[in-house]
Image: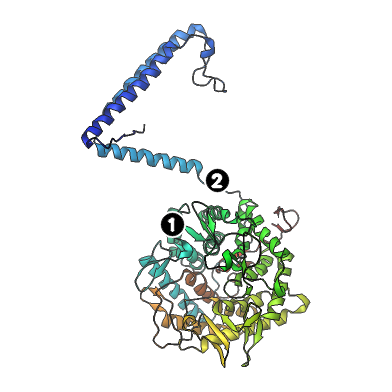
Amino acid sequence: MPIFILYKPTFTKQYAILDTKFILLLILSAFITLCFGAFFFLPDNSKHKRFDFGLEDVLIPHIDSEKEARHKESLRDKIRADHERALQEAKEKLRKSKEELKAEIQTEKTKVVEDLKKKDGPKPLPPVPMPKLVGVKDGDPGDPDTKEKRDKIREMMKHAWDSYRQYGWGHNELKPIAKKGHSTNIFGNSQMGATIVDALDTLYIMGLHDEFKDGQEWIKQNLDFSVNAEVSVFEVNIRFIGGLLAAYYLSGQEVFKVKAVQLAEKLLPAFNTPTGIPWAMVNLKSGVGRNWGWASAGSSILAEFGTLHMEFVHLTYLTGNPAYYQKVMHIRKLLAKMDRPNGLYPNYLNPRTGRWGQHHTSVGGLGDSFYEYLLKAWLMSDKTDTEARKTYDDAIEAIERHLIRKSNGGLTFIGEWKNGHLERKMGHLTCFAGGMFALGADGSPDDKAGHYLQLGAEIAHTCHESYDRTVLKLGPEAFKFDSGLEAVAVRQNEKYYILRPEVIETYWYMWRFTHDPKYRQWGWEAAQAIDKYCRVSGGFSGVKDVYSSNPTYDDVQQSFFLAETLKYLYLLFSSDELLPLENWVFNTEAHPLPVLERRGPEQTQLSLSMSLSYIL
C-alpha cells in the first residue's frame, strides 16, 4: 500500500520522520479497528446482510441463519489475521530509513502511472484492408553505370544517417560541423527525432534495414507527443504524420500507424477557429493555437492549411474516424465559395474573419504545396476526386495567365503576384512545379497533356540553368529575370543552398515521364556538387554562397535532405518499378502513400459524409 509522508517545515528532519511514523501507525490502527468493530456493532437486520450498490450479492452474500454464526466466526478470524498482518507491515515500514521509504513510494508511483497508461492507452485501431502495395523493394536499374551512381547515393545517405546517429540522435536535426543536435522553432522546444521519422522510408527503400530498425526502436521507446511544445501544424503533418504513415505502409509495422494517429489527435485542436481554417501552430499539450507573428494581419498560410489533405484522408481510412476527412474537406468547401482576384489564390487567409490577407500569390514559398495537393488528392483517390482535379485545372490556368512568363533569353519562369503586379523572381521552392506540371499532364482538359509536359520540361531547364550559372553548380534560394540578369541571385541573402530537393524532384518526375537521359545527367551533376561542397566529416551542411569558390557552411543537416533530396536522387537512378506512380503518390515531403484504389461494388465503400467517396 502507498505510504504518504507529511513534512512539517518548522521541525528538524529527525522529528519530521518520527512524526510521520507515529501518524502512520495511528492512521493504520484506527482504520483497522474501525473495520473490525463495525462488523459487530451494525444492527442485525437482513437489509444489512448485503451492501447494496445496485448489484446483486456484492461483498457479503445473503445467507440463512443456521450458517450465519459459522460465517461470522470465519469473518472474525479473517479480520483478526488481516489486522495482525497490517500492523506487522506497518512496523516493518517504520523500521525503514527515509531513503528506503522514498524509493518505495517512487516504485508505487511508477506502478500507478504504468497501470494508468495501460488503462488509458491507445485503443486498438480497426483492421482495414491494406491498399495495393507495388514496387516497395529493389528497383535495380540494370546497367552497371547507373547502378554505380545509385550506390553512391546510398553511400551518401548512410553517411548522413550515421553522422546523425553518432552526434545528434534523438534531436530533431544535426549540426554537422559542431557535431551536435539542432532544432528550429517549427518543432518548438521539443526533441522529437524529426530526422529519424523523416528518414525512415528512405532507409527502407534503400535497403538499409539495420538503420531502419534502429529508427523504429527509437520511435517505439521515445517518441512522445504529450510534450509542452508549440509546433508547426504543417511541418509536423508533412514530416511526422507523412513519414510515419509511409513507414507503416512500406514495412507493415503497427507502431508507425499508432504513433501517426496519436499525433494527429494532438493536431485537431488547431482547427478550433471561427472559420475552421487551422492555426499555423498548436501546443501539443494544451491544444492552444496561434499564427505566426509575421504573417499578414494574423493570417493562416495557404501552403500550410492547404497541405493536409493527403495525410488526413489516409488517417480516416486507417482509423474509421471521419473527423480528419471532414476537416480538410471543410477547408476546400470554404475556399470554393470565396472570390479569387484574377482567379488566383492569395497566400494569406484570416482564420477569424474568413477574408484574404495581403494579395500576394506564389507558386513558391507560402503557396506551393496547396496546388500540389489538389492534383495529388485526385491521383490518390484513383482519379475519382474530380472536384479536386477541376480546382487544380482552374488554378493552373490562372497561374499560366498571370504568373508564367518567358525571359528575354528564352527561359520560362514563374513569377510572384504582389499587389497587382508581377515580380520577376523565382524561388528554388518553385522549381517543384516542373514535376507537378508533368505529373498532372495526363488528365488535363482540352487535350493539353503535351502542353503541360512541355511546360514541365521548360521549368526543369530554367531551374537547371540556375544551378549551372553558379560556381558550385548548386542552385541559389531565389533568382531573378530582370536588369539583364537571368536565373541568377542578386541579393546576398538569396545566394545560399540548404540541401533543398525541389530541382532534383522535378528531374525525377521528368525522367519518369520522358526517359530523356539529360535528367539523369543533371541529377548526377547535382549529386556530385553536393558531395563535393556540402559533405563534411560530421554529415552534410548547407552553404551560404553558391557563387563563392570558398563557401562557408550554415552547419545544418536538414531532415528533408534525408527525406527528399537523397530519396529523389536514389529513385532517379532506379528503375520505374520502384514505387511506380500508378500506385503511389508522394506527399510534399517525399513520403510515398498508396493510391486508394477502386475495387468494385462488392468491396466496402468509404463514404466520408461529404461529396467525395473512396471505393476501397
Quadrant location, the N terminus = top left
Tell me the element at label 2. Answer: loop
Quadrant position of residue 508: bottom right
Q: Is residue 37 left or right of residue 444?
A: left
In front of the other: label 2 or label 1?
2
- Amino acid type of the residue tagged 2 in the rendering: Lys
Estimate the x, y position of residue 25 in percent, counting from the top left: 30, 25
Badges 2 and 1: C-beta atoms under 8 Å apart? Answer: no
- Amino acid type of the residue tagged 1 in the rendering: Glu
Q: Is residue 414 or residue 454 the one in the foreground?
A: 414
Residue 222 versus residue 571 in the image, above or below: above
Estimate the x, y position of residue 459 in percent, counting from the top left: 62, 83
Q: Which residue is mark 2?
A: 123
Residue 419 versus residue 483 in the image, above or below: above
Quadrant location, the C terminus = bottom right
Estimate the x, y position of residue 126 in percent, counting from the top left: 60, 48
- Residue at the outermost top position: 66
Seen at 50% across and 76% down, the residue is: 500
Tell me the element at label 1. Answer: helix
Regarding residue 517, the answer to whether it shows in the image is no
Q: Is residue 162 left or right of residue 415?
A: left
Seen at 58% across and 54% down, the residue is: 268
Cα distance, mark 2 to mark 1?
A: 21 Å
Please tell me how crowded label 1 is: few (under 14), some (14-19), or many (20+) other residues with Cα within 10 Å.
few
Q: Is residue 390 or residue 254 the one in the foreground?
A: 390
Regarding residue 578, the answer to whether it shows in the image is yes
Residue 596 versus residue 44 in the image, above or below: below
| Res 477 label | none
Q: Which residue is mark 1?
A: 217
Seen at 56% across and 76% down, the residue is: 429
